Amino acid sequence: MGKETLPLPHPSEVSRVGEGRCPSVRLTPSLSPSRASAGSGVSAIDNKIERAMDLVKSHLLLAVREEVEALREQIRELSERRAALERENLLLRALATPQQLARLLSLQPPGPPPAPP
């Protein structure tokens, strides 16, 4: 893109500080018709970008929600499996003789002791 220059007022239209000779001179540049249409083009592009970003955000939120739901389901299944295994472990310990438990403990590799139920 080429460099765009703003129209400058004629030196006779510019007042010096403290002088109020030209109250009608605006310090903000006015837009010509070609600039106004360029501004609406920029606005249209901004709107498209904003809509695209909203669409991406919606898709990401949907994907995250689905993933969270899948992980919650997996956590629920693992919790149920853990509870079933703990029940099975308690039952087997209750049915095992002291000699069987001693033999099992001697076969276990060294490491942290099993957590109590």
Image (spheres, helix red, strand yellow):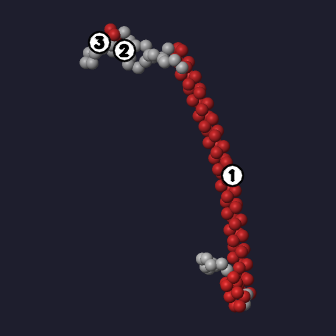
N-term mark: 3 or 1: 3
Say what secondary structure mark 3 lies in: loop
Q: Quadrant of the N terminus?
A: top right
- State the residue at coordinates (70%, 60%): 73
Horizontal and vertical percent position of residue 21: 29, 12
Q: Dot 1, crowdedness within 10 Å: few (<14), some or many (≥20)?
A: few
Image quadrant holding the C terminus, namely: bottom right
> What separation in Å lies between label 2 and label 1 (alpha carbons)?
60 Å
Residue furthest toward the left? 18
Alpha-carbon neighbours of circle 2 within 10 Å: few (<14), some, or many (≥20)? few
Q: Residue 42, how many percent across, how many down?
A: 56, 25
Q: Is residue 76 above or below residue 40?
A: below
Mark sitting on residue 12: none
Q: Secondary structure at mark 1?
A: helix
Residue 65 in percent (x, y) is at 66, 51
Q: Image height check: is 30 above or below 77?
A: above
What's the CA distance linking mark 3 and mark 1?
A: 68 Å
Residue under label 2, please give it.
25
Residue under pointer 1: 66
Locate residue 2, reporting x and y percent: 51, 17
**Residue type at the position of mark 3:** Arg
Kindly identify which residue carries mark 3.
Answer: 21
For numbered disc 2, what is the local secondary structure? loop
